[in-house]
Image (cartoon, rainbow, N blue to C red):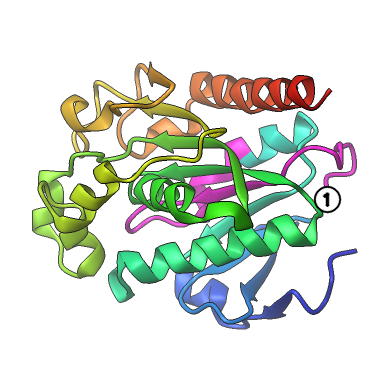
Amino acid sequence: MRPRSLLHAVPLAVKELSLPAPATSTWRGCAGVRNVVMADGGPSPCGDSRRAPVVLVHGFGATVAVWERLRQRLYAEGFSHVVMAGYSAARTDPATVCAGVAALCQAVGSAFASSGIHLVGHSLGGLVARSVAQSVGESVRVDTLVTIATPHRGSHAARLMGGGCARAMRPGSPWLTALEEQRLQDQTWWVNYYSELDLVVRRSSGRAAGCGLNVVVGGRGHQGIASSPFLVDHLVGQLTSSEARDHLVVA
């Protein structure tokens, strides 16, 4: 059972995100963290509690619904704890979202007594995941970082939107420059997915420099890429392989 002291209820979370919660999910806020909420379905009945928790971070203007196919597949493959972070990008700024997701990762790792987590982000969520993985330090270990359709060098589409998060995604922004100057934890395996059909994040921005693996996903645009059967299969395989490598190192 999850410690009751870790999380407290956020009654309006679902309403604010304009998304009905899946029947198996519970929505909660992380104590002391504003503007970031979480939804998770609890332990999978067929899951392996030894697997690291997976934290999913959606993008600008999206909701946790983007993760439904991946969440179901993770449960089917034995990942017991899958947590989806939700936020409203139009109402906040990158620093606040990153602080909230970092605190959520720390809380999740502590709650499930895990030495590490897998952190996955789509679009703006990929930039947030990168920032968290580069800055959380020793308090939480990010075993695998996955970025999907992420504007590593910005998106000109962000010029059409207002707010701090949109400004941060514009090419040459101070936030993007700072991300490029930071380094990941040594043990973090970084996998990046992008699409040649993405009209929001072009190939030149979607390919990541310095990651362990760049993977092109065919036949999907910016939003559809997260539910691509190929991506879901490949991503779950990467998380499973990452855990196998960790077990070999420990042994």
Tell me which secondary structure the magenta stretch mostly adopts. Answer: loop
Position in image of residue 207 (x %, y %):
27, 26
Q: State the residue in front, 168 or 217.
A: 168
Q: Is residue 24 above or below residue 77?
A: below
Q: Looking at the image, can residue 140 be seen?
A: yes
Residue drawn at x 75%, y 60% as measured from the top left? 110
Q: Quadrant of the C terminus?
A: top right
Residue 170 drawn above or below residue 215? below
**Residue wearing tag 1:** 43
Rendering quarter of residue 79: top right
Could you say which is closer to the camera, residue 182 or residue 232? 182
Element carrying mark 1:
loop
Res 20 seen here: no
Crowd rating for badge 1 (residues with CA inside 10 Å; few <14, some 14–19, many 20+): some
Q: Mark 1 is on which residue type?
A: Pro
Side of 175 where 33 appears, left or right:
right
Q: Position of residue 63 (x, y in %)?
A: 46, 57
Question: Where is residue 3 shown, x and y percent of the image?
Answer: 84, 71
Magenta residue span: 43-70
- Which residue is at a point 19% across and 48% down the rendered structure image? 177
**Which one is nearer the viewer's eye here, 74 or 15?**
74
Q: Position of residue 82 (x, y in %)?
A: 69, 48
Q: From the image, which quarter does the N terminus lie in? A: bottom right
Residue 99 within the segment the image draws in magenta: no
Q: Residue at x 38, y 26 (%)?
A: 211
**Residue 50 in magenta stretch:** yes
Q: Is residue 162 above or below residue 227?
A: below
Q: Quadrant of residue 246?
A: top right
**Residue at screen point 58% across, 82% down:** 32
